[in-house]
Amino acid sequence: MKRPVLHAFFLLLSAILLCACGKTEDTQKNGEIRAVSLAPALTELAFHLGGGDSLCGRTDVCTYPPEAEKLTVTGHFADPAAETVLKLKPSHIFANALINPRQKVMFEKAGIKVFLHPCDTMEDYLFWVNLLGRELLKPEAAAQENARINNWLAENRTRAQNGKRVVFVLWDDPLMVAGSSTLPDTAITLAGGINAAAGEKGYLKCSREFLLRSKPDVLVWAVNRPFAQASEFLRDLNVPQVYEGFDLDALLRPGPRFPSGVDAMRSFLERAEK
């Protein structure tokens, strides 16, 4: 970008920033909540708590519940278009991450409350339940959700394991599976299974040999196409059971639907033959 054009761009952004700052202060004085959510799980949670009417912006992947699609799209996950966000004049921004951390400082200078925290575990989810309950003025709904999740976690942790060895596949070209310290690993454990890739941490690339050594009883197919279209070597492995066709978001997002996703997988694992 040439210097005169770059200078003009920053002048425009500064003008938007100044305008947004004044409007945001007015909004906060009037007690009006206008929030932008930069993560699908947080958008879903806001609606789940009854605070969806306080949202004014979302990312392009915040598509649940259907009412969320009526909101203005501000950019991609963790990568908002600053001008679009500022034009919405929000009082709050909720995000799991920001690709450009400097945006947090810029938004805060505009008088916007920016809440930045991961949402990778159920502990993170409960943190957000309490935070959104407070900031969206839905404390009773947050307390109910907190109790629901904690009761569900306690119940599942006391249930017997079914002993099924599970490989959770997120992609097959290259082959990507979920190891320990991941949400799918939590889902497998809560569903009574054993993560065959738990010896490795995080999301990892693995080989055919790895799958042969892990001897899975069930392959969870979390890829957005049928297993029949999987790579040839995966189809030739003859894993006894393939779990597919489930709600991917329910198991890949720590949100209100996670318990139902885990319960459905537990039901499958209990029926699966070794």
Image (cartoon, grey):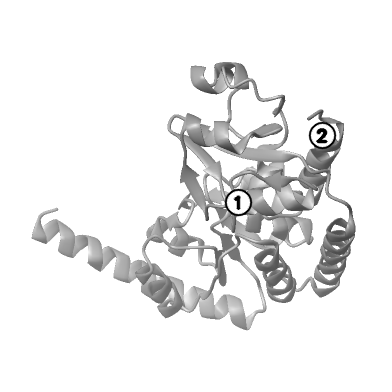
Identified at 70% across, 40% down, the residue is 165
The reply to whether residue 231 is in sight is: no
Q: Position of residue 16 (x, y in %)?
A: 37, 67
Q: Which residue is mark 1?
A: 198
Residue 127 seen from this side:
yes
| 217 vs 186: above or below | above
On screen, residue 151 versus residue 178, left or right, reads right
Q: Quadrant of residue 268?
A: top right
- State which mark lies toward you, 2 or 1: 1
Mark nearer the N terminus (2 vs 1): 1
Please name the residue shown 52% across and 55% down the image.
201
Q: Name the amino acid, label 1.
A: Ala
Q: Residue at x 73, y 73 (%)?
A: 130
Determine whether the residue tagged by mark 1 lies in a helix, strand or loop.
loop
Q: Is residue 182 above or below residue 10?
A: above
Give 57 or 61, whichever is nearer the viewer. Answer: 61
Which residue is under mark 2? 268
In what element is the residue under mark 2?
helix
Residue toward you, 183 or 106? 183
142 relative to 34 in the view: left or right: right
Please tell me how crowded label 1 is: few (under 14), some (14-19), or many (20+) other residues with Cα within 10 Å. some
Seen from this angle, which residue lies furthest bottom?
A: 29
Quote the CA–CA distance across marks 2 and 1: 20 Å
Q: Amino acid at mark 2?
A: Phe
